[in-house]
């Protein structure tokens, strides 16, 4: 099994604060892997290092065996990373369909001339983007909302649209930052089934999530961070029963 992502000895320091300390992890092709831990544990900082928003103080990040440490976020995105954020970042004045199509623009090949004169190449590419957007929206159960403004959707469906837009880039690794945040029980269950479906279609997924039921029911492996350090790793059963994880994060059943 080849590793899509390798994080090797990564540390991240902001002045006197060490947000991450010697983190090692890997994500293999086709896996769903979770990162959990208390608030301030360094989870989003790790996402930001992996996606190039931060240049790590120490260590390396590799994708498919290639060192991508320190590359700009847009270059890393072109290498095949796509992410969602804790706070929804849609284009509010654009339709659901246009939000997804915009996710494809980093991979389109039409130039300025093609756009100005609407060349056959541009028209063909636009048709391909519309067809792909239709496929993604149907897969994410958003097709009926295709003409709606993004911000007119209920919160849970906006979350799904963010994932749809990320999928439009054909990512090798999909990074989801708290995808179930703010969702009700039914929305969370629907999202869980959708993520499983994405995996069955060959997607590799790394997620941060506070909903432990969601994490334990979907992840094959879990990394636990605490105060910027790797506290534990393993399959859900191993992590659930780890005394250090129980004390630091999960708590006891009678707490």
Image (tube, rainbow, N blue to C red):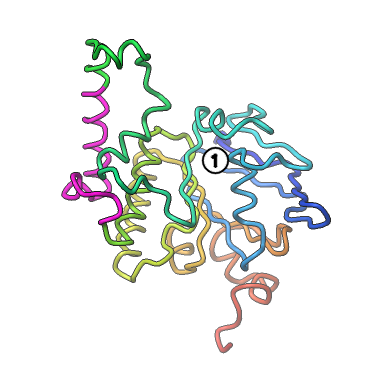
Q: Quadrant of residue 228?
A: bottom right
Tell me which segment is drawn in magenta: 126-152
Q: Quadrant of residue 7?
A: top right
Q: Which quadrant holds the C terminus?
A: bottom right
Q: Residue at x 26, y 35 (%)?
A: 133
Give the percent coordinates (x, y) of residue 27.
57, 43
Give the percent coordinates (x, y) of residue 210.
51, 66
Q: Is residue 221 left or right of residue 117?
A: right
Compared to residue 106, the image places residue 20 above or below, namely below
Which residue in the rendered view is the most extreme toward the bottom?
254
As helix, strand or loop, the secondary structure at mark 1 comes to: strand
* Majority secondary structure in the magenta region: helix
The front one of 29 and 16 is 16
Q: Is residue 150 left or right of residue 59?
A: left
Q: Is residue 46 left or right of residue 96?
A: right
The answer to whether residue 75 is magenta is: no
The front one of 137 and 235 is 137
Q: Quadrant of residue 119?
A: top left
Compared to residue 74, the image places residue 97 above or below, namely below
Q: Residue at x 49, y 32 (%)?
A: 80
Q: Residue at x 48, y 44 (%)?
A: 83
The front one of 107 and 26 is 107
Q: Is residue 45 left or right of residue 132?
A: right
The residue carrying mark 1 is 28
């Amino acid at each position: 099994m080849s590793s899509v992502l390798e994080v090797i000895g990564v540390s991240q320091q902001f002045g006197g604060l060490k947000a991450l300390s010697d983190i090692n992890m890997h994500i293999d092709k086709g896996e769903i892997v979770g990162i959990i831990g208390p608030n301030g544990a360094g989870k989003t900082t790790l996402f930001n290092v992996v996606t190039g928003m931060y240049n790590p103080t120490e260590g390396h990040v590799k994708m498919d065996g290639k060192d991508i440490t320190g590359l700009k976020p847009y270059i890393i995105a072109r290498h095949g990373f796509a992410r969602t954020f804790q706070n929804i970042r849609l284009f509010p004045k654009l339709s659901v369909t246009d939000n997804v199509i915009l996710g494809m623009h980093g991979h389109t090949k039409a130039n300025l001339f093609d756009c100005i004169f609407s060349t056959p190449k541009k028209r063909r590419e636009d048709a391909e983007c519309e067809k792909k957007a239709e496929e993604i929206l149907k897969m994410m159960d958003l097709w009926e909302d295709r003409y709606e403004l993004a911000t007119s959707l209920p919160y849970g469906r906006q979350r799904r649209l963010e994932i749809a837009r990320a999928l439009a880039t054909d990512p090798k690794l999909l990074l989801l930052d708290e995808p179930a945040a703010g969702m009700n029980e039914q929305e969370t269950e629907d999202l869980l089934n959708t993520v499983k479906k994405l995996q069955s279609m060959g997607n590799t997924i790394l997620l941060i999530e506070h909903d432990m039921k969601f994490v334990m029911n979907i992840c094959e492996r879990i990394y636990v961070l605490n105060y910027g350090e790797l506290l534990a790793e393993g399959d859900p059963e191993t992590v659930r029963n780890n005394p250090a994880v129980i004390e630091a994060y999960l708590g006891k059943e009678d707490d």
